[in-house]
């Protein structure tokens, strides 16, 4: 919401024994320009005082808000931002503890990130928002939608939200290895998510950005938190349509299971890995545009999720 212009209080001076004509009223100054949604990079501060940078591109009534994955940052959407900006306003952020965001926080949770993104939506006074969440950004988007009712129209999941009934407690078997050797285990983990034969440079970039030892505390805290998530409840609580663009392998997308909890559908892309928006943008971007357009074409009544 734009700030109200400053109100000027004009007074007429009356001197003892004489009168004077009132001076011409000074022109009212224009309202200060609201730069929060101007194209470029901005910084917002979360409720607990963490600096959160975000970039804005494009313009329009609808906003596509891009939420990155675990140990990633907003630059992972570089191939999508200019394409989306031709039709919509685009906002991409660094979650706390990631990218250029601050890390002055002791409680690292996915639900907390949902509150951060919902807070940014309210700060920017956005309506007609489509959240696009990659990997961890999928659960973050579910929580965001629940915390920003009436503002979020839907979610596009990118290789995430495969199974609302998945038992995340299984993360425990990986956690010990990460705790013992974070960088080495993370590097092996990343290596297994690039089946594309021509993705070496992108894989190296992901490994360098995601597996730094300096990220260990945040990364481990989030992994521990993954095991506590009730994704089925989060699907239902989001209350908006979910459209997934997932790699066809190795993780199956349980469409019928997910439909028990939300208005859900998915496109499965063959021969791609976990970072398909980076490795195959020419194939991925049209699918993303279609999913966003489908969500925005639904009326709010049509967009309501079925009861669990």
Image: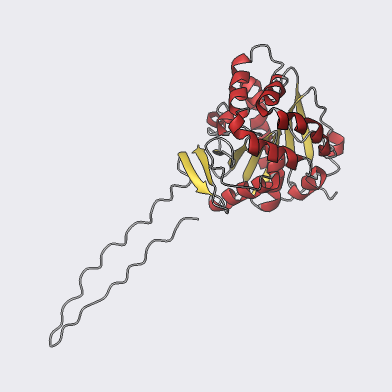
Can the viewer see residue 180? Answer: yes
In which quadrant of the rendered view does residue 94 lie? Answer: top right
171 lies left or right of 12:
right
Return the x and y of residue 296 as percentages of the image width and height. 66, 41
Judged left or right of residue 84, residue 2 is left
Q: Nearer the viewer, residue 184 or 287?
A: 184
Residue 293, above or below 301: above
Q: Is residue 201 above or below residue 48?
A: above
Way the structure is coloured: secondary structure
Image coordinates for residue 180, horizontal then vertical, percent: 72, 29
Q: In the image, what residue occupies the spot 72% across and 41% down?
A: 139
Q: Please tell me how many numbered marks the rendered image carries.
A: 0
* Residue at x-position 78% and y-position 30%: 174
* Residue 259: x %, y % from top left: 84, 40
Rendered image quadrant of residue 208: top right
Q: Residue shown at 63%/35% (left/top)? A: 68
Q: Nearer the viewer, residue 300 or 269?
A: 269
Viewer-closest of 308 and 100 = 100
Name which residue lies at 81% across and 30% down: 253
128 and 75: which one is in front?
75
Which residue of the protein is positioned furthest toward the top in this rendering?
Answer: 197
Q: Which residue is most to the bottom?
A: 17
Residue 299 appearing in the image: no
The residue lying furthest to the front in this view is 180
For residue 244, above or below residue 278: below
The image position of residue 52, as x and y in percent, is 53, 44
């Amino acid at each position: 919401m734009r700030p109200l212009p400053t109100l000027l209080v004009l007074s007429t001076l009356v001197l003892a024994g004489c009168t004077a004509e009132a001076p011409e009223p000074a022109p009212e100054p224009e309202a200060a320009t609201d730069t929060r949604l101007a194209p470029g990079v901005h910084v917002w501060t979360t409720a607990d005082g963490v600096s959160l940078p975000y970039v804005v591109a494009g313009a329009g009534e609808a906003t596509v808000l891009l939420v990155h994955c675990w140990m990633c940052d907003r630059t992972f959407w570089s191939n999508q931002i200019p394409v989306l900006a031709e039709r919509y306003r685009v906002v991409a952020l660094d979650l706390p503890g990631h990218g250029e965001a601050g890390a002055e926080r002791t409680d690292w949770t996915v639900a907390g990130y949902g509150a951060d993104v919902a807070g940014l939506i309210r700060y920017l006074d956005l309506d007609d928002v489509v959240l696009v969440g990659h990997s961890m950004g999928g659960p973050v988007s579910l929580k965001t939608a629940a915390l920003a009712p009436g503002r979020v129209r839907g979610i596009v999941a990118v290789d995430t939200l495969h199974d609302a009934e998945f038992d995340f407690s299984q993360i425990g078997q990986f956690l010990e290895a990460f705790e013992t050797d974070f960088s080495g285990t993370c590097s092996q983990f990343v290596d297994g998510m690039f089946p594309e034969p021509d993705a070496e440079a992108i894989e190296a970039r992901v490994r360098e950005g995601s597996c730094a030892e300096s990220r260990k505390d945040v990364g481990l805290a989030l992994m521990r938190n993954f095991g506590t998530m009730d994704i089925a409840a989060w699907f239902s609580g989001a209350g908006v349509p979910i459209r997934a663009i997932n790699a066809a392998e190795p993780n199956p997308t349980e469409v019928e299971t997910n439909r028990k909890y939300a208005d859900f559908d998915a496109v499965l892309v063959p021969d791609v890995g976990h970072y398909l928006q980076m490795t195959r943008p020419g194939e991925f971007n049209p699918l993303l545009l279609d999913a966003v357009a489908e969500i925005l074409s639904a009326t709010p009544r049509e967009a309501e999720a079925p009861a669990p």
